[in-house]
Image: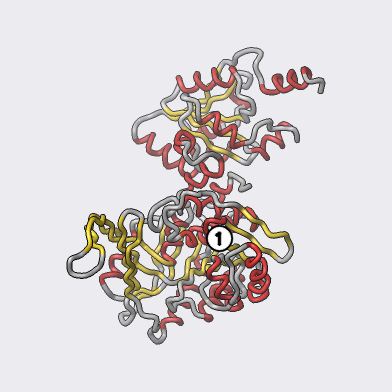
Amino acid sequence: RVPLMLIDDIQDRRIVVVGDVMLDHFVRGSVSRISPEAPTLVLNVETDLWTVGGAGNVAVNIATLGGAALLIGLVGDDAAADRLAGEVERHPRLLNRMVAHPSWPTIEKTRFIAGDNHLLRADRESKRLPDGVIEQLIARINAVAEEGCDGFVISDYAKGVVTADVIAAVCAAGARLGVPVVADPKRPNFAEYRGCTVLTPNRKELSMATQLPTDTDAEIAEAVPMAMAQFGGPIILTRSEQGISLFREDAEPFHDKPRNTALRDVSGAGDTVAATVALALAGGVDMKEAAFAANIAAGIAVGKSGTAAVSAAELMTTILHDPQDQVLEQKLVPVQTAVRMRAQWAEQGLKVGFTNGCFDIVHRGHVTMLRKCRDRCDKLIVALNTDASVSRLKGPERPIQSEGARADVIAAMEAVDMVLLFKEDTPLKMIEAIQPDRLFKGSDYSVDTVVGHEIVHGYGGEVVLIDLVEGYSTTRIVERSRAANGR
């Protein structure tokens, strides 16, 4: 499983994306007739949409997941470059670090789509790089690395930007900083990516590198050792409708089933995988957890039409629960999202309350307390200890219910407006970040023993003690249950 706190740990991680940047143009409409001029479909155009594509789509995914993406690529001096720059500016977490050259046409892909059916793609591109451009790209890579970052992605679309020298420069920068380098490969030999931390090819790219078929499990099992011998490191293989697989020299292969069987469009799913793996590794999880998180994110992406980005809220909700559970999706958020929402509530003049606990087995006492808290504020935020935090506080046999189940129950309560998870023993960091107007705790505490009371009083907030319902506590319920079962 992916630790839920990964969602918070990846927020604001700076990931440098280097590769083939392009402008994606989607021409959508409907088809109802054949042209009288030629045996071809007539698309009645309804909408035109331009987005950042190629390596830019990796960067958009990083930004949407909550990271900060610094995008390095090559564009021209043309209308497509201007539109591309405008699309980049629409994403506040996506930073333009691209190199422009007047003799290079900005790569543009135009897709003609009826419903979810792709009818035709028209490409405008040149694979002949202008002289001196690679040196400019390497200088830009080194300059951005000097600013500091938490990881790199090499997004190779075989359009000419990702040369051996560019790969070497990124790997050298990653080694200097001690950060992961994720490569989404297109080159016909994976040896050219040596020095990267992990590769994220699909089956076609694995087949191209090994000159072996890769349609079945047996064929993949035969091809992977050759690919790993070329690369010299782990490979996360995206397998479309068959999910994802992680191969490492020192461990058994890890296979995770597909997370979405209702595929709408696989365009850009590889970009989502590369972005999620880079953020997850930067956030501190191991390779297996990064692969699992990437598979979940890809499952969300392929359920959308066109190249689509995945949000932190979507990823968290899917990790926790059924993606169709809209109540949970709306209420369970990363702490950075909570801070932004709290600011909006303040602008609206709403009083924000905060309380916390394990809420291991929700009982009448919990329900009554949360209702009383909500009566004293306009919006109520409830912070839950993660499973690891509960175990440290309550002992190795706790929690009884997982953090996912506990979050689900609390989010379903009408009195609760937002649910957070914290991995520390106390919610002090969350209280500092959110600065609630009222900090609630049970009357079994005194004001000066409530964690965070100094902070709340410091900015003029209030600590409120709520009367408890006598005879109700999770510890007593657990003890009575064990006694009844002879434990």
Q: Which residue is mark 1?
A: 239
Q: Is residue 95 in view? A: yes
Q: Looking at the image, which residue sits at the far left?
A: 36
Of the pair 292 and 132, the residue shown nearer to us = 292
The quadrant where residue 123 appears: bottom left
Q: Is residue 336 above or below residue 174?
A: above
Of the pair 483 and 465, the residue shown nearer to us = 483
Q: Looking at the image, which residue sits at the far right?
A: 486
Q: Position of residue 145 (x, y in %)?
A: 52, 69
Q: Is residue 180 left or right of residue 54?
A: right
* Amino acid beneath label 1: Arg
Q: Is residue 447 left or right of residue 476?
A: left
Of the pair 452 and 44, the residue shown nearer to us = 44
Identity of the residue drawn at 67% across and 35% down: 390
Q: Position of residue 116 (x, y in %)?
A: 36, 55
Q: Position of residue 346 (x, y in %)?
A: 38, 34
